[in-house]
Amino acid sequence: MRRGTGYILTIAIVTLLCVATSVRPVRWDLTEDKRYTLGKPSKNLVKTLYQSRADQVEVEILLEGELNSSFRRLKRATLDLTDELARTGIIRLMPTGEHSTEGLQPTVIHEREQNGKTVQTTVYPYALLRYKSRRTVVPLLKNNRMLSGEQNLNKSIEGLEFAFAEAIQSITRDTIARIAFIEGHGEYDEADVYDVSQQLSRYFDIDRGAIPQDWRVLQPYKVLIIASPQQPLSEQDKYVLDQYVMHGGRVLWAIDGVRVSEDMLSESGFTPVIALDVHLTDQLFRYGVRINPVLVQDLQCLTIPVDVSGEVGQPQYQPLPWTYAPLLLTSNSSPVTRDVMQVSSIFASTMDTVGGGDDIRKEVLLATSTASRITHAPAEVDLGNMQIRTQAFSSAYLPVAIRLEGNFPSVFANRMVPEGLEEHDRLNRSERTKQLVVASSSILQNNWQQGSPLPVGYDRYTGIQFGNRDFIVNAVLDLADDSGLIALREKTIALRLLNDKRAHEYRLLIQTISIIIPLLVIALLAGAIRWGRKKTYTR
């Protein structure tokens, strides 16, 4: 009787578990890097959307066709992520439509088979997200030319959660955050930052304008961008910016340490280098950094075509290193610059961390290579002297961009309010906020060719797209971010590559072991069970 009751209880428990898991499947992520677990910012995002009873986001994955093993892994990772998001009820997977790929740039995969034949496959590594009448595209594939194909695919898988979370947040929000470019001091105009503005317009409403006389006018803006001022800022302008920061405002400062005339350089092959003072030294010092009036040279740099013929009318151009255009290294320890390609710049300066306070966190995001040097202003740049003495490039990792976060002291503490301004809710120490200071405004500037803007960071001579776009977009998203989504870019998945050569050499042995060992294990288990039953029930 007891044995029968135990059987019934066991069957009842198993049945209940089966019913419960069929209604709400249970998953345990046993991987070391938690690749199948949503990060806390993602969980907070979907929880907020669920509580607000938002409509479902329709997701359409376009990565279809004859995929090789690497792209199948990318698709599998994408499906795993979307399945996990679908469990929250926020998204719904949709079948691929006929016209979904219109306007998207395909990726062509060239793969060599064992018989030596090359196979070409066209794929669309994108996901389409639709919410009500809105639509956005999520690129699934990253393409850093400095990395191998397998490394790029692994980086793509690592970035999937951030890409989807950011896209879901962007497409579902009812109000769009606002940012502004400051004008009035010779800053870059709309044409100079056209590409950056286009990229940021996917996430923000963008305005341009002069600094008002009341800091409260700036309060609706999540981020202010001050890109390459050439004339000094007045004390009134500095006070308004200072109080904007004191009340939690975020600023991206792109300030040059020296003044160089590119027009003079292109016309005469020579330009003087003089210190550029826009009266922000004391203010940035109080916030924790100082931009030095120096010019950086780096052996890791862009190249420019130079006429080496020496004859009039018969130019002979040869690409030579342009050490005044350093390729800046990105920090892999920050979510802003993690996995971002080198950032191109020209006529950059260096920075020091100074002043501020102990509670201000200072993080270097961009730096020179291990073969760099600095030239103090005043100096000169002469295209007629392109000789490089490598032994002079002995400096390393000179900071060019620094991120600041904390409670900043006011530069106007214990000072009178500038004449002509009124004191409105004045603070001498800021709320906790963030700033980014870059000592090279050129990283934001795009060039133009035949009336069309080139992508920022694009080198027209080599055809390489450097990481300027990603850096600026990530930086502004980080400054404007209150939910911590940018931290999802820190997700790491270990890359475990299969040795294709050894796998091919030992193919027969591997196949034999894979087939025989499981059969042997099953046979041993069956024999052990039979022996156990025989011993138990035989008297």
Image: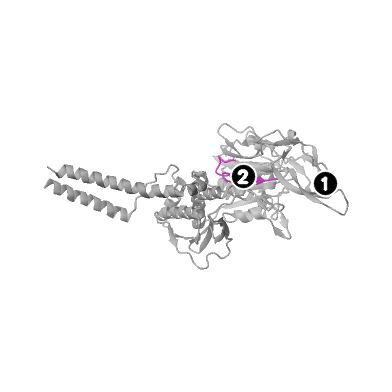
Q: Quadrant of residue 237?
A: top right
- Residue 49 in magenta stretch: no
- Kindly state the secondary structure of the residue where label 2 is placed: strand
Q: Nearer the viewer, residue 449 or 502?
A: 502
Residue at image position (44%, 49%) is 508
Amino acid under disc 2: Val
According to the image, label 1 marks what residue?
269
What is the image's colouring?
one colour
Query: Would residue 446 appear left or right of 83 to someone viewing this image?
Result: right
Q: Residue at x 51, y 56 (%)?
A: 68
Residue 319 visible from this viewpoint: yes
Q: Which residues are magenta?
A: 331-345
Quadrant (top left/top right/bottom left/bottom right) for the C terminus? top left
Relative image position of residue 206 (x, y in whole percent): 61, 54
**Tag 1 or tag 2, which sits nearer the N-term?**
2
* Percent x, y of residue 61: 48, 60
Res. 55 in view: no
Q: Residues within 10 Å of mark 2 (few under 14, many from 20)?
A: many
Q: Give the left or right position of residue 443, taking residue 149 as reference.
A: right
Up/down of 349 relative to 107, above or below: above
Pointer 1 local density, CA inside 10 Å: few below 14, some 14–19, many at least 20? some
Residue 203: image x %, image y %?
Answer: 56, 54
Location of residue 536 with respect to 352 vertically, above or below? below
- Residue at the disc numbered 2: 251
- Residue 335 sits inside the magenta stretch: yes
Looking at the picture, tell me which residue is in the foreground, 178 or 214.
Answer: 178
Q: CA distance from mark 2 to mark 1?
A: 36 Å
Q: Nearer the viewer, residue 130 or 301?
A: 301
Q: Position of residue 316 (x, y in %)?
A: 82, 51
Q: Is residue 533 left or right of residue 411?
A: left
| Tag 1: amino acid | Gly
